[in-house]
């Protein structure tokens, strides 16, 4: 009698939709995107009025700056130059010098990167202050929801196991190889996401707010300790600039991860809250 070899049929992959992002998280996320975009562009307009950064109390044309965006004359032509410390990089056409048709304009950041596109410090400040207050209100609502609704404790607080060197090393290696969580692991943020979000929410953004207030003479009059804390208005301006571009770097990495790990699935979850998960047993 022949022996029948019974083989198990692999389980078909199943798809599950989970509710990943709450309504407050989704609304504040998109408002943050709007505010940060316009704050950056109006901030670059303000920076263009004096495209140099200093440490300390004062910053005048004759004082040494640690960063500057300007121009140098090369014969009959004008070249754009970005200088950081003793390092100078030619940036003609991007920074320092902008060309519109046959016209050459000396300006730190080009017109397409600023609001308004033309050079106008007063208008840039009005845009910046309006969206700064909108951002503060939106951020305050998010913080209230995060603490009172348990979002920070439930979704962003890393466990001791996640913070172990071996786990962090594995997460970094997986991301470098573009190996993203699947199945049950995809239901939650990984530790790199948690740490990066916490750094932005509780370090970079508060520093942006505090240094922005320190640059206001009226705020300094009411709270003079701000100048002492940051070592002067020019130091606050430098920290403000560094934090802004740190957030830009975070956003670029965030967008890259969103695209690489599944653009439509991630976008749908941040618009509708629904996030699709494929079980690990069935494969991808």
Image (spheres, rainbow, N blue to C red):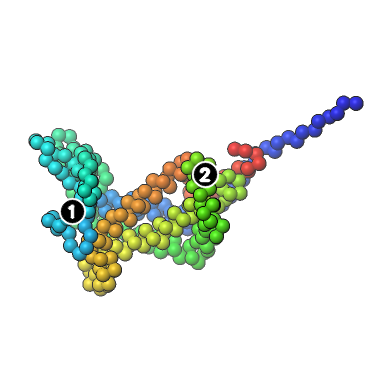
Work out whether residue 275 or residue 262 is closer to the camera in this orientation and state it: 262
Residue placed furthest toward the right: 1
Residue placed furthest toward the top: 2
Q: Is residue 210 visible?
A: yes
Work out whether residue 55 or residue 23 is closer to the camera in this orientation and state it: 55
* Residue drawn at (28%, 50%) of the image: 41
Horizontally, residue 223 falls left or right of residue 101, namely right
Give the percent coordinates (x, y) of residue 124. Answer: 23, 54
Horizontally, residue 12 falls left or right of residue 237, namely right
Q: Secondary structure at mark 2?
A: helix
Residue placed furthest toward the left: 76
Give the percent coordinates (x, y) of residue 87. Answer: 23, 46
Q: Nearer the viewer, mark 2 or mark 1?
A: 2
Q: According to the image, label 2 marks what residue?
A: 174
Question: Could you tell which of marks 2 and 1 lies nearer the N-terminus?
Answer: 1
Give the percent coordinates (x, y) of residue 249. Answer: 36, 48
Residue 50 tag number: 1
Residue 120 tag number: none
Horizontally, residue 16 falls left or right of residue 257, namely right
Quadrant where the C terminus is found in the figure: top right
Quadrant where the N terminus is found in the figure: top right
* Residue drawn at (55%, 46%) of the image: 181
Q: Is residue 34 visible?
A: no
């Amino acid at each position: 009698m022949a022996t029948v070899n019974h083989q198990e049929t692999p389980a078909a992959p199943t798809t599950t939709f989970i509710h990943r992002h709450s309504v407050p998280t989704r609304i504040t996320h998109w408002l943050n995107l709007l505010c940060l975009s316009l704050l950056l562009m109006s901030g670059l307009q303000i920076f263009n009025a004096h495209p140099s950064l200093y440490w300390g109390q004062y910053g005048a044309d004759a004082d040494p700056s640690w960063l500057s965006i300007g121009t140098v004359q090369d014969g009959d032509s004008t070249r754009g130059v970005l200088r950081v410390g003793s390092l100078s990089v030619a940036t003609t056409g991007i920074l320092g010098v902008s060309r519109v048709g046959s016209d050459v304009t000396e300006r730190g950041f080009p017109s397409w990167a600023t609001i308004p596109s033309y050079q106008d410090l007063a208008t840039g400040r009005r845009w910046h202050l309006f969206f700064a207050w909108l951002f503060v209100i939106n951020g305050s609502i998010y913080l209230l929801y995060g603490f009172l609704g348990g979002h920070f404790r439930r979704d962003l607080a890393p466990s001791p196991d996640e913070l172990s060197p071996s786990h962090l090393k594995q997460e970094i290696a997986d991301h470098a190889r573009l190996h993203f969580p699947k199945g049950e692991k995809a239901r939650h943020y990984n530790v790199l996401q948690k740490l990066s979000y916490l750094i932005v929410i509780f370090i970079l953004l508060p520093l942006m707010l505090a240094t922005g207030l320190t640059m206001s003479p009226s705020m300094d009059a009411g709270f003079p300790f701000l100048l002492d804390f940051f070592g002067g208005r020019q130091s606050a301006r430098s920290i403000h600039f560094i934090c802004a571009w740190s957030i830009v770097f975070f956003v670029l990495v965030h967008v890259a991860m969103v695209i690489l790990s599944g653009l439509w699935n991630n976008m749908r979850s941040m618009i509708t809250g629904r996030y699709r998960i494929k079980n690990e047993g069935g494969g991808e």
